[in-house]
Amino acid sequence: VQLQASGGGLVQAGGSLRLSCAASGRTFSSYVMGWFRQAPGKEREFVAAISMSGRRTSYTDSVKGRFTISRDNAKNTVYLQMNSLRPEDTAVYYCAQGSSGLRLDIASSEYNYWGQGTLVTVSS
């Protein structure tokens, strides 16, 4: 399985970015997809997850109402739309593929495959 994340960059506080993650090598539509992030000097943390159908989603509290995860199974791609960005959102963002099609795990240990990460920098 290969996951290729893209869309990161430098943005001012209050701005928006959309991350994309293209998957190949395993039936994309059969697995939960997630986004995690890791800020400098901090541990990797859960951001959002989406079920295989896209009907169920889960978010960490700090991004609720600002970030939206979605997926296009026809394109084998998962997205993270990030609005109202804050400096504390600065991190390397990783997409990951879970081991389940339904369970929206927040633990990184439940995800089997990871993308290379894309850097998001939010300036104040």
Image (cartoon, rainbow, N blue to C red):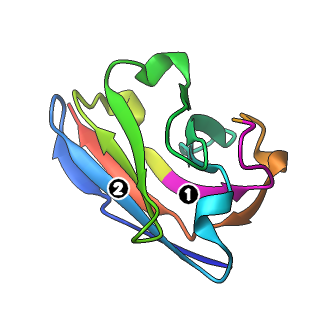
Q: Position of residue 53 (x, y in %)?
A: 55, 47
Q: Is residue 58 left or right of residue 64?
A: right
Measure the C-alpha gap from mark 1 to mark 2. 9 Å
Q: Which residue is mark 1?
A: 95
Q: In which quadrant of the rendered image does the C terminus lie?
A: top left
The reply to whether dot 1 and dot 2 touch (C-beta < 8 Å) is yes
Residue type (three-letter) at the residue carrying disc 2 = Leu
Q: Position of residue 21 (x, y in %)?
A: 45, 65
Q: Which residue is mark 2?
A: 19
Residue type (three-letter) at the residue carrying disc 1 = Cys
Which residue does the image show at 80% across and 55% down from the upper left?
99
Q: Is 22 situated above or below 108?
A: below
The one nearer the camera, 70 or 52, is 52
**Magenta-tinted stretch:** 93-103
Q: Position of residue 78 (x, y in %)?
A: 45, 57
Which residue does the image show at 40% across and 29% down from the upper left?
88
Q: Position of residue 61 (x, y in %)?
A: 52, 16
Q: Is residue 109 left or right of residue 66?
A: right
Residue 90 in view = no
Could you tell me how many numbered marks the image carries?
2
Q: Is residue 99 magenta?
A: yes
